Image: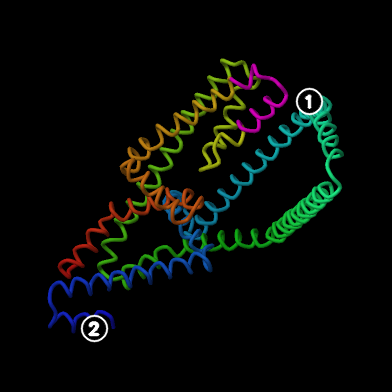
Amino acid sequence: MIDTIFGAINMHSHPTVLRLLRLLHVVIIFLITITVVYFTIIYIYPFVIAFLLAILLIKPIHFIEKTLPVSRGVACFFIIVGIFILITLFIACSTMESIQAFKYLSKHIPVHINTLAQFVQLQLENHIIPFYNRLMNQFDALEQSQQQAITQQLQQSMQQLTETSASFIETMFTSFIKALQAIPAFFSICMFILLGTFFICKEWYKLKEWYQLYLPSFLKNIIPSIGLATKHAFLGYFKAQLLLTFISTSIIYLGFVIIRVDFAFTLALLIGLVDFIPYVGTGLFFIPWIGYLFLTGDYSLTIPLAILYGVVIIQRQITEPKLMATHIGVNPLLILMITFISYRFFGMIGILIAPLLTISLQILHQSGLTTCVWKYIKDGSL
């Protein structure tokens, strides 16, 4: 319908007008695509995940199907069950290690809590209580009206604090209940993902035939390019994050060895694992640790840990843009600009989605889609 209208207009329009109309055409298609993708992710995201998993599993399934005298359905079943078993073993091993870690912490944390409690008690006796006594003496010296005003203000502040605390506790319990209620839904979604992956892998050839039969020729040419660009971009991002984590973990391990921290290798691996998770960072461990040591007066370890944390942060800020540019192929200045613009539009969430936006733009560029769109707007040809 739209193409027919544009074809009728093309016969009697100025080239500039035609370009503007083709630009409008592209904008409309872009908005429709974004809307479709948005609602697809919201309502049928388990099957999107299943499709992505099927893409990853299709080669191993082909190998099983050719190597063993089994049907395609059996090969799909073997691969999916094997992956499920591996994930289950990983979760079991992680749970056992977590139990051992909690046993270790249960023996040592009470000692640190007792030390912190003694420190707080000492601060109360030496500073807080004398300050309170001086404050009360000054309060008694005030006039009756001033005392009433201060008392009334304190009561209002305490009431607000009580209401805020009650609201926070209520929100926390509500979130906890919602999390418990979401567990059955989570397992249901996982079941849909597994079944969807199985049937997509099993019917892969039929889906490929449908793709060849019904998809427009323009999309047939551009989709493989988008797939290759996507694979290259995400693998590059993963390699860059892995290398950054390796560098940070090595620095942390060497720092722990130098300052003689117990269980240096295990702690460095644990912090490195957390550092691999985007935007969680090493601060999840270092900041509480440094704060506790500072409060307890252990400055001999506080200062070296703070210096080590600063070195890790600085090296990551320096090396991350360079590694991203090398492995993804994006200029560091462009990454910085996209991050800033995303932050201005979306706030802190924008910082989280900035890498995804950067990768998406790089995929569009490397796949040649932007060149095709520009050629269509300029000349009217694909």
Percent across and percent down for residue 84 are 59, 50
C-alpha distance separating marks 2 and 1: 79 Å
Which amino acid type corresponds to the residue marked 2 in the rendered image? Answer: Ile
138 magenta-colored: no
Could you tell me which secondary element the residue under label 2 belongs to? helix
**Horizontal side of residue 310 vs 299, given as left or right:** left
Q: Name which quarter of the figure residue 380 lies in.
A: bottom left
Residue 73 vs residue 28: left or right? right
Q: Which residue is mark 2?
A: 5
Residue 196 drawn above or below residue 359: below
Depth check: 299 or 128 in front?
A: 128
Task: Tell me the tag on residue 119.
Answer: 1
Q: Residues within 10 Å of mark 1 (few under 14, many from 20)?
A: some
Picture quarter containing residue 91? top right
Q: How many marks?
A: 2
Report the quarter where the C terminus lies: bottom left
Could you say where residue 27 lies in the image, as x and y percent from the top left?
Answer: 31, 69
Which residue ends up furthest to the front in the rendered image? 143
Overall secondary structure of the magenta section:
helix
Image marks 2 and 1: residues in contact by CB distance under 8 Å: no
Viewed as shown, does residue 321 lie left or right of 131? Answer: left
Q: Which residues are magenta?
A: 286-303
Place of residue 61 in the rendered image (x, y in percent of width and height, measured from the top left): 45, 53
| On screen, residue 293 above or below 282 | above
